[in-house]
Image (tube, rainbow, N blue to C red):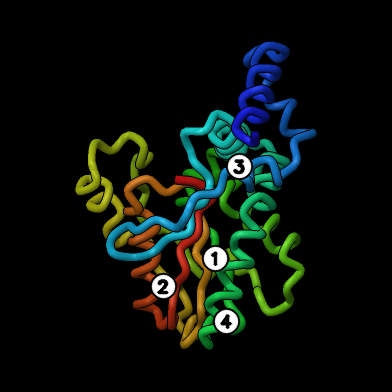
Amino acid sequence: MVKTLLQAFRIVYETLFPTHERDAWLDVVEPALLSRLAHPPITRFGTTMLAPLPYQNTLVRNAIHAAKYRGHVRAATVLGQAITPLLIEELADKRMLGGFDLPILIPIPLHPFREEERGYNQAERIAYAIIQDLQDPTVSLHTHTLVRIKHTPGQARSKNKQERLKNMNHAFKVPDYHILQGRHVILLDDVITTGATMYAARIALLDAGARDVLCVAVAH
């Protein structure tokens, strides 16, 4: 039923909207429509990662492209709100086992050159949407705790997993280690492919003293 509704929705907006107007559907779409597409967690580099939405789905992919490449603010909001219920469930499970107290939400940073060129960081916008939707004072948003120090080519252009991992080697650092000592971290990105970017950022956080890092992305 859900799949049929999604297919119908896609056909309607592709028929009605020319290419340059296709972002208009994001002004009215409900996040729950995307939430229903959720998949189980995935494993990359031996680490479980929560990346619930299927990137190959047309609606998901278009929303991510709108947020990432066209600066569509509501697209980022919808994506964040779509995965918030799933993140709440994951945090509840972790807390039930006695972990993940007072977690820090850290969006994957862009290199300053890339962010200046783009004018925004889509992962940061998604993180703001999650924080607002969570309404949980125990979760705090940190946008400067992790920084990107290596300007790499877009990971989508890399040929394989090994090349992507090499590109991301020592790409991130934590300027102030005191912030992370013994803390739990939710590391957020928009899309996971091989997981190389998330892996490199996770290692930087753990090396800086983070107790545990939950890797989360909107899609894979």
- Marks 3 and 1, the one that precedes in the sequence: 1
In the image, what residue type sits under mark 1? Answer: Ile
The nearer-to-camera label among 4 and 3 is 4
**C-alpha separation, residue under disc 3 versus residue under disc 1:** 19 Å
Mark found first going from the N terminus, 3 or 2: 3
Give coordinates of residue 193: x percent, y percent.
Answer: 37, 45
Label 3 residue SS: loop
Q: From the viewer's perspective, is the residue at label 3 or at label 2 nearer?
A: 2
The numbered mark, 2 or 4, whose residue comes first in the sequence reads: 4
For the residue marked with disc 4, what is the amino acid?
Arg
Q: Which residue corresponds to the image point at 43% horizontal and 83% vertical from the top-left?
A: 211
Q: Regarding mark 2 in the picture, which secondary structure is present there?
A: helix
Residue 141 marker:
none
Circle 2 residue: 205
CB atoms at circles 4 and 3 under 8 Å apart?
no
- On residue 106, the disc is 1
Within 10 angstroms of label 2, few (less than 14), some, or many (20 or more) residues?
many
The quadrant where residue 212 appears:
bottom left
Check disc 3 and report the residue beneath it.
119
Q: Are marks 2 and 1 in contact (CB under 8 Å)?
A: yes
- 145 left or right, relative to 15: left
Give the amino acid at mark 2: Leu
Residue at mark 4:
95
